Image (cartoon, coloured by chain):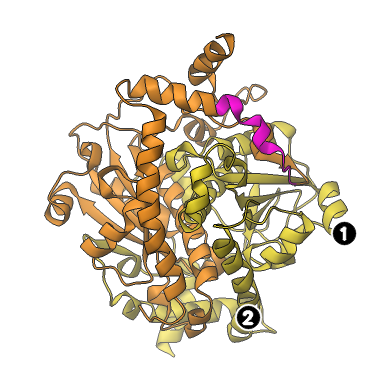
Chain colours: A orange, B yellow
Amino acid sequence: MLKWLRNFAALFTGKPAAALLHELPETIRLLFARRSCRSFNDEPLLDEEIHAILEAGRFAPSTVNLQTWTFITFTRQQWHGTFDRPIPFKGCYAIIICADIFRLKNFLPDLQETPFVNLSLGIFNAGLAAMSMTMAAEAFGISSIMLSETGRAGLLDCAFLKEKLALPESVLPLTTLVLGRGGRRLPGIPPRQPREAVIMPAAYDRQASSHLGSWYEQMFIGYKLTHPLSSFEKQIAHYRTKMVQAEVVIRDIFLAGRKSRG
Amino acid sequence: MLKWLRNFAALFTGKPAAALLHELPETIRLLFARRSCRSFNDEPLLDEEIHAILEAGRFAPSTVNLQTWTFITFTRQQWHGTFDRPIPFKGCYAIIICADIFRLKNFLPDLQETPFVNLSLGIFNAGLAAMSMTMAAEAFGISSIMLSETGRAGLLDCAFLKEKLALPESVLPLTTLVLGRGGRRLPGIPPRQPREAVIMPAAYDRQASSHLGSWYEQMFIGYKLTHPLSSFEKQIAHYRTKMVQAEVVIRDIFLAGRKSRG
């Protein structure tokens, strides 16, 4: 019970530690304060803000400067026109972020031979661009969330997204970045794994999972607090079903890379 | 010749566009000004700065808050002890960023069934953490570069890194983030693909590659400017050799995920 209470408390106290730095630079403060938001108001975003956010993505770093990403952008109206429903969480603007080698194939035909390398670096670079756009939004006081499966708009629904958007075979939609204002932030903090599980000085620690017990319990407690009628077990079973479906599609994308031209 | 001159000029003028925003927030300025640096001086980083940079990575967002990343950290001395050479570009500190599902397997045994989903989201999340740490460094005035193959420290040398660090089979090293001060920044800007090739309003544009002609020429001109004795063609051939080698390794990691437990 004491352990449970400690893990309960950790959900409200588990902030990033930077005690020794008295004056944190603005960007560090934003990185530490950033939270995924699940409700937005109707206040619109400025065109100039959207433009700068997309520029932050376009100017992200990438492997050999190949820019292996595509940003498919949606106003509320455009999202409704495509998906026949609102942007999840009533967001104001949405960006579907894809790993995309397709448009490079004409220029670098050798890429045909290495689909696993291409997709791996394509996904990693898309992550760099996604975080750049998230931080650009934070800089304007715009809240955001990156979707994994809510509203069928993340990697776990890549088959649905590929069909709806008629994406070429080799283009992999990874997430929808939902943007908006007035995001209500829950008081707790999604529990982070402890430093000793994640940060390994000079050598890999195969026993790192032994540090995850408290984190795992915090995940269960935190889920129950935000979803009192459900449980993390049920949610894991739900994810599992969708992951098994997505597995077939993603596997095909990787394995088809070699023979297909899109 | 006029076209060549225009593409030459673009290497020095292709900045992110945000003309309409008179006062850019600090974080946007950092995102737009960030450059990969290839030379560092001997001025050390503060422990507090390194700590905050790693915290920025640990508190990055991730799919279902699974934090599918590992950061293996190296001082100059530790890097030398492991690799018997200096950190590439004489960096002051290095972080090998890995996609890592390995330590979650005890907690979420279902993950055994879906290696392609796991690795895809693991790589994407690692990208989010990598960009968070890069931006945290920028906030302290610390320069950085993420390596793809220089010094055998990126994804294209994942076989070498896996062996040197005795990584479990399912752990994929993606890049080394090199940090240091005094990074000399070259005057030009690695050319970005034009907006119309990358940002697609509400629908995927299969003709996007038709916008890449100038960008591709700029890549060749830019490479010649920074490597007068070589050429981008030669460099592509070099990457190709390494990519074909890495392909076998990465493919094995994805395909082995299902049967292996480490």
In the rendered structure, does residue A211 fall within the stretch colored magenta?
yes
Left-right relation of A52 to A63: left
- Is B85 in front, or is A59? B85
Q: Is B257 placed above or below A118 here? A: above
**What label sits on residue B84 in the rendered view?**
1
Q: Is residue A43 above or below residue B230?
A: above
- Parent chain of label 2: B
Left or right relative to A170: residue B123: right
Residue A173 placed where, x, y %? 35, 59
Quadrant (top left/top right/bottom left/bottom right) for the N terminus of chain B: bottom left
**Magenta residues (range):** A204-215
Q: Residue furthest top?
A: A2
Q: Nearer the viewer, mark 1 or mark 2?
A: 1
Q: Which amino acid does the dot numbered 2 rest on?
A: Gln
Q: Residue at x 67, y 58 (%)?
A: B184
Q: Position of residue A198 (x, y in %)?
A: 64, 38
Residue B190 visible to the viewer: no
Specify the quadrant of the image occupied by residue A43: top left
Q: Residue at x 62, y 73 (%)?
A: B248
